Image: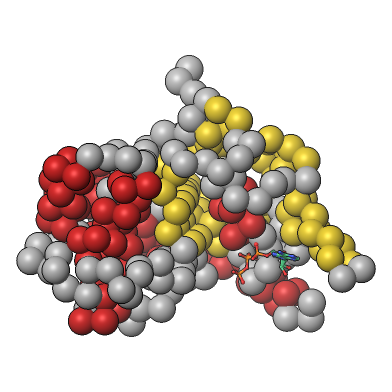
C-alpha cells in the first residue's frame, strides 16, 4: 500500500487562554490519499482552520499525530502549499516578484526563478501581467497571483482555506474551474475548507462534515460525479442534488447548534 498523503490520527486541540479552555477539535482521524480532493465543511468555529494549521505545522496539536507524505508533522511543514482567505500578496512587489518570493526563500537561482515565474503566469492565465502591481489587478486576478505563488515551489499538497470566499459568484465559478484543471493536470492532493456546500460538492471527491464545537468528523460523503467536471453544469446533475440533500441533512443541525454558542 502506498503511503497516504495525509494521515490524521486521533487529533485533539485545546486552546487555553484568558482563564478558559476551548476544545477546538476532539479525536479527529482521517486519511487522505494522494491525488484526492477533499473538502471540509462545518459550522463556524468547528476547527477547520485549526486542522489546516496543524497539517501545515503552524500550530501544535494537544494530542494525536499527523503524518504528511510519510513524515510526522512536528514543526513548520514546508512541503505543503497553504492559501488562506486573507490576501497574501504583497502590494509593494510586482506580480512576478510576488510569485518568485517563495523561490527566493528557498534559494532557487535567479534564472530558474524567472523560468518558473513565466510558467506559473501561464498556468493561472496571467501572462503579460508580470510587471503589474497588485493594486492594478482585480480581486480574481490577485487571487490567481496568490495561487501561482503557492504553486511556484511545486508542493504536491495544497491546503486552501476558503480561498474564493470573497469573490463574486461568477468569478468564483471561473476560479473553481481553473483549480480543477490545475489539480488534474498536476496531480495535486487538495484539502479545501469552504462554507459553500455547492462549492464543496462541485470540486471535491469527498466532503467531510464537522460537527459544531468541539469539532468532530460527523459524516463523509463520497461524490460520485466523474472528472473532468464542468463546475458551471455540475449542479444540474442528479448526483449533485442527492449529495446536497445528504450533506445538508448532516450539516444543518450543526449550524443551528452553532448559533447559540
Ligand atoms: N489562538 C486561539 N486561541 C484561542 N481560541 C482559538 C484560537 N484559534 C481558534 N480558537 C478557537 O477554536 C475554535 C476553532 O476555530 P477555527 O478558526 O479553527 O474554526 P473554523 O471552523 O475554521 O471557523 P470559521 O469557519 O469561522 O473560519 C473556535 O472556537 C475559535 O474561537
Locate residue 32 relative to residue 215 in the image: left or right: left
User: According to the image, what is the colour scheme of the structure?
Assistant: secondary structure
Where ligand 1 lies, by image quadrant? bottom right
Image quarter for residue 246?
A: bottom right
Q: Residue at x 52, y 25 (%)?
A: 70
- Is the residue 78 above or below the residue 212 in the image? above
Residue 150 visible in the current orientation: yes
Q: Residue at x 44, y 39 (%)?
A: 79
- Name, please, the residue furthest toward the right: 19
The location of residue 71, given as percent across then percent down, is 55, 28
Q: Quick one: 134 or 217, which is closer to the camera?
A: 134
The location of residue 9, given as percent across then percent down, is 68, 36
Locate residue 149 relative to residue 194 in the image: left or right: left
Locate residue 228 relative to residue 70 in the image: left or right: left
Q: Residue at x 59, y 60 (%)?
A: 49
Q: Residue at x 92, y 68 (%)?
A: 19
- Name, please, the residue furthest toward the top: 1
- Is the residue 70 above or below the residue 78 in the image? above
Amino acid at each position: 500500500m502506498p503511503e497516504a498523503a495525509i494521515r490524521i490520527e486521533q487529533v485533539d486541540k485545546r486552546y487555553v487562554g484568558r482563564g478558559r479552555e476551548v476544545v477546538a477539535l476532539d479525536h479527529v482521524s482521517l486519511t487522505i490519499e494522494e491525488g484526492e480532493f477533499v473538502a471540509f465543511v462545518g459550522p463556524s468555529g468547528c476547527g477547520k482552520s485549526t486542522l489546516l494549521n496543524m497539517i501545515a505545522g503552524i500550530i501544535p496539536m494537544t494530542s494525536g499525530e499527523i503524518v504528511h507524505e510519510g513524515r510526522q508533522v512536528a514543526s513548520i511543514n514546508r512541503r505543503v502549499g497553504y492559501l488562506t482567505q486573507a490576501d497574501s500578496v504583497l502590494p509593494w512587489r510586482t506580480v512576478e516578484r510576488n510569485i518568485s518570493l517563495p523561490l527566493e526563500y528557498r534559494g532557487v537561482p535567479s534564472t530558474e526563478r524567472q523560468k518558473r515565474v513565466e510558467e506559473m503566469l501561464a498556468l493561472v492565465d496571467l501572462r503579460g501581467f508580470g510587471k503589474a502591481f497588485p493594486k492594478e489587478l482585480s480581486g480574481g486576478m490577485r487571487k490567481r497571483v496568490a495561487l501561482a505563488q503557492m504553486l511556484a515551489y511545486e508542493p504536491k499538497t495544497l491546503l486552501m482555506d476558503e480561498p474564493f470566499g470573497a469573490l463574486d459568484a461568477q468569478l468564483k465559478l471561473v476560479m473553481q474551474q481553473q483549480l480543477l484543471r490545475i489539480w488534474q493536470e498536476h496531480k495535486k492532493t487538495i484539502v479545501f475548507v469552504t462554507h459553500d456546500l455547492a462549492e464543496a460538492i462541485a470540486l471535491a471527491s469527498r466532503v467531510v462534515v464537522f460537527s459544531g464545537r468541539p469539532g468532530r468528523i460527523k459524516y463523509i460523503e463520497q461524490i460520485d460525479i466523474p472528472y473532468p467536471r464542468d463546475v458551471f453544469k455540475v449542479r444540474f446533475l442528479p448526483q449533485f442534488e442527492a449529495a446536497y440533500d445528504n450533506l445538508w441533512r448532516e450539516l444543518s443541525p450543526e449550524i443551528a447548534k452553532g448559533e447559540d454558542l
